[in-house]
Image: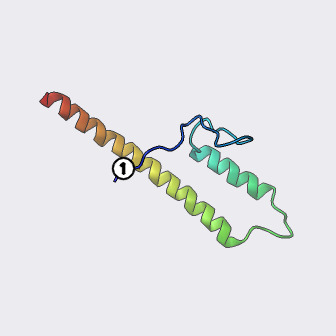
């Protein structure tokens, strides 16, 4: 099964949509999380479940980035081996 890209990276998806320049990285994610914590209402703080879910998302982001780096190394090894065979 193949999955085709339905929109280009520059496609805004409609009028008024914000165009991202790149993926949300660890630094940006942590800045958003800390900003959210600093500006929350002290009389009605964020629920523990929501905060834990965001931390889990951050952990998942780190793991996916590490996995992507390892897959890039594996792909490089396969490309090098393929070019040696030809």
Residue sitting at 25 percent across and 34 percent down? 79
From the top left corner, tell me how far across and down residue 78 is, in percent. 23, 38
Residue 11 rendering spot, x and y as whole percentages: 60, 37
- Identify the residue under disc 1: 2
Examine the rendered structure and indicate whether residue 35 appears above or below residue 20.
below
> Where does the image place residue 6, in percent across and percent down from the top left?
51, 44
Which residue corresponds to the image point at 61% horizontal and 35% vertical from the top-left?
A: 21
Figure check: 48 above or below 67: below
Q: Quadrant of the N terminus?
A: bottom left
**Relative to 22, residue 3 above or below:** below
Q: How is the image coloured?
A: rainbow
Can you give x and y, in whole percent of width and height, for residue 51 in the image? Answer: 66, 65
Q: Secondary structure at mark 1?
A: loop
Quarter of the figure with residue 27: top right
> Which residue: 75% across, 51% down?
35
Q: Looking at this view, is 1 or 31 the one in front?
A: 1
Could you say which is closer to the camera, residue 20 or residue 5? 5
Q: Residue furthest right?
A: 43
- The residue that appears at 41% across and 49% down in the rendered structure is 3
As drawn, is 43 to the left or to the right of 64? right
Residue 86 placement: quadrant: top left
Few, some or many residues within 10 Å of mark 1 (<14, 14–19, 20+): few
What count of labels does the image hold?
1
Residue projecting furthest to the left: 85
Q: Is residue 78 left or right of residue 38?
A: left
């Amino acid at each position: 099964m193949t999955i085709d890209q339905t929109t280009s990276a520059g496609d805004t998806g409609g009028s008024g949509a914000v165009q991202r320049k790149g993926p949300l990285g660890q630094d940006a994610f942590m800045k958003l999380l800390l900003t959210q914590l600093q500006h929350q209402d002290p009389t009605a703080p964020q629920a523990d479940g929501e905060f834990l879910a965001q931390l889990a998302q951050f952990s998942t982001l780190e793991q996916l980035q590490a996995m992507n780096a390892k897959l890039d190394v594996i792909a490089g090894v396969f490309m090098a081996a393929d070019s040696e065979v030809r």
